Amino acid sequence: MGALFRSEEMNLCQIFLQSEASYACVSELGELGLVQFKDLNPDVNAFQRKFVNEIMRCDEMERKLRYIEKELKKDEMKIPDTNENPKAPAPKEMIDLEATFEKIESELREVNTNAEALRRNFLELSELREVLKKTQVFFEEHGGHHSMIDDAQMALVHDEAGMPSTTVQLGFVAGVVPREKIPVFERMMWFACRGNVFLRYEDINQVMKDPVTGDEIHKSVFIVFYQGEQLKARVRKICEGFKAVLYPCPENAQERFEMSNGVATRLEDLKTVLYQTEEHRRRVLASAQKEIRQWVIKVKKIKAIYHTLNLCNFDLSHNSLIAECWCPVVALEDVQRALRHGTELSGSTVPSILHRMSTKETPPTYFRINKFTSVFQSIIHAYGVADYQEVNPAPYTIISFPFLFAVMFGDVGHGFIMFLFGLWMVASEKKLLAQKSDNEVWNIFFGGRYIILMMGLFSVYTGLIYNEVFAKSVNIFGSSWKPNYDNSTLEANKDLTLNPATMFDNVTGPYPLGLDPIWLSSLNKITFTNSFKMKMSITIGISQMILGVLLSVVNHIYYRNWLNIFCQFIPELLFLLCLFGYLVGLIFFKWVSYTNECTQCAPSLLIHFINMFLVKYQHANDGYEEQAYKCETADPDITGCTSQTIFYPNQMVIQLTLVVVALLCVPTMLFIKPFVLRSRHNSMLRRREGLSAISQSALIHNEELNEQSGTGNGTADKEQAISDIELGNVHSSEVKLSINGEGGEHNQAEMEDQGPSDVKVDDFDFSEIFISQAIHTIEYCLGCISHTASYLRLWALSLAHSQLSEVLWGMLFRISLTMDIKYGGSVIIFAVFAVFAVLTVGVLLLMEGLSAFLHTLRLHWVEFQSKFYHGNGYNFDAFSFKHLQNADLDD
């Protein structure tokens, strides 16, 4: 939890690698996954870097692997997931991989080319066989010769064209055309030839496949009879325009029979050759299928290593590479071990050196998380990555997020269904991960399986507090209300009022867990639950905001922002406690002090809170103040107490003091910090002028000028300081200014108060700082009011969820259960339950659950995190091979 509370301490390191050991060392660092490399060549484009040729070779290998993978998918051969994580191969093994991929690709391309030619030949022969078969049937129907059709069909053609019927010698062409083009083909042939041709066609029942794509194609055999060479040329042009394939068809029946037998023999031979070709292709793919997953990981690791090596500087004089990287301090020993191991693997005799550097750069933010905490950390990072070592809201979000969700979603039944769904995803985690689903919606749900589990569990708890199970109450411990009405009274009155003075069992006390079940059946249920949930929402919201303000002081102490503690944290906390913390105190005071025997003088907290700012108070009758405070006299006419009467001693003085303190906090936040920063800035300028320094970096660490003497030792010290700097006795990166003898920490605190650590003294702008502080003050003061009101969404959504559940139950089960249908009631209940289940899951679980989730997200991002969390950092992007194990070639 300590690592999750604040990001890991990071260190900028410099690594010196020998050229022969650089590849192996970077490979070991990738397996470790705890180093983020910096680009030391930002001005060099990708094509001018040292290892660009190796990366291009990796790209070519990836292209070949993609081709092999495409062929495997074409044959529906599943790539096995062995969960193996092979090491990155040595550079010399790249040649073997390239040769292997080249051999497989060339062999597959050759096989595919031959198979495509064979399939095309097979398709042509199949079409020719169908043409011969269909034409033979046609000629047999008309006497066995094409010239015999003139007595019937051509006579009909001539009659329609207005020509005399005579015996003519006809020519014909036969072929195949796509089935969907037949109607257009027929009309075009008729109009282009002016009705002087005779067309017959018939569909091919055999399913044929495209030789390239493998898709099914549907064609029809046609035969066209014509007279003369002009019509012959016109018919052929039309066939060419429609991409119809013409096949030779002998006029003699014997020749057609012999050709058909020859085509059948060639088709059988082609089937055998095609089968052998496909078998050879499957053997090639089967051999690649076993290794392709490891090949993909290896190639991606090689490419990642060379990409990383391109980020380094190359030292020609020492034949070495220099890299800079961010690394967690706790992992420095692991990094050094990885470097030693890489050096041993490479056989280098010169060790790799890891040098820790000092820098003013802002380190990246790194949290050690697991699969449970990762979803909560993702919610925080969606708002913004934490500043370096800033307080992380994730540990508190683990509890507060599902709890606030459950406050709005409280129902035992709905929460239990959500809990079971989350439990199933957690229990089946390995099996579901192995499926590698590409459904985006499912991946979102599965990624949030732990938060769904927690939200369901917390919803069961709040459902017990609300005593709601699918909008119905459960009487487990027995109600504390004991009505004593007889049957005649119950039959005579539709509505009855229970008097708490006589019908509430004060011996057993209130219902042990949650609301008493009798409230769910009462007419004033909404009035009671609204009051309860509204006060509960205010209490929870103000408590979480106070926690946010308290966490801000942890940041101030860690960053040594002492000025922010006194001029920001303390006024903010007092402002929040004096106004809204006091309101929470009033809520608990009213709950504790006013029982069912003293309801006439119970205060209206909202009116009292408004009167607190208006300085408007109403007193009880003279002499009855104590009785009104203690509710000793229940008659309000005697005591003169109402809901607006002062209800505890010294209330006016206490409330006036709280308002004054809260109002004084506003100018404290607004004015003190800017003027203190300006005073520090002016003091620093005077110190610099007294030392005759040109810039802040030209001052010796802890140098103190003797301003009282004015001459003598002070002048000597100044001259000695300047001399030391000029002679190089003091390193410029170690030079800091000391204010009032407090050392460098005081100066660092001042620079942090002013803003970023690299702000120069001459860049101080008082107006900008004052405006920024004014914006912060206004935003905080107004935000306390608006954020408190915003937490009322807990009450509103809880009420909406409860009412939707009740309406759904009333519209379905309540109506169906009151139907008096003999033998048909069970069928109706069964159908109604199906509708009830669908609407419960679709509306109450999915839609209402998503709504409550989004509102909970807003409460954490705006109301809670705005009190202490900046989120201006950048994430630690480690060089790691872990994500490559499940990577695809397209990633």
Image (cartoon, rainbow, N blue to C red):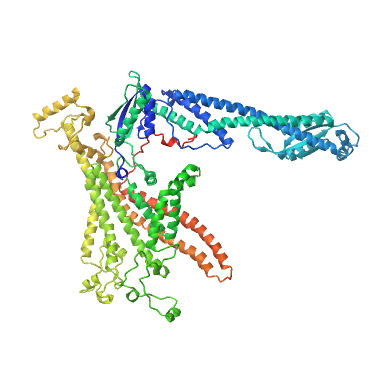
Any part of residue 198 in sight: no
Outermost residue on the top side: it is 317
| Residue 430, position as x, y percentages in the image | 45, 44
Any part of residue 765 in sight: yes
Residue situated in front as seen by the camera: 714 or 861:
861
| Residue 587, position as x, y percentages in the image | 29, 63
Outermost residue on the bottom side: it is 488
Q: Is residue 856 above or below residue 466?
A: above
Q: Is residue 50 above or below residue 408?
A: above
Residue situated in front as seen by the camera: 587 or 230:
587
Picture mark count: 0
Residue visible at 58% across and 71% down? 822
Residue situated in front as seen by the camera: 243 or 333:
333
| Residue 425, position as x, y percentages in the image | 45, 49
Q: Is residue 54 above or below residue 744?
A: above
Tell me the quarter of the image containing the N terminus: top left
In the displayed structure, does residue 580 sit left or right of residue 846? left
Quarter assignment of residue 298: top left
Quarter assignment of residue 268: top right
In the displayed structure, does residue 512 sit left or right of residue 282? left
Quarter assignment of residue 262: top right
| Residue 847, position as x, y percentages in the image | 47, 54
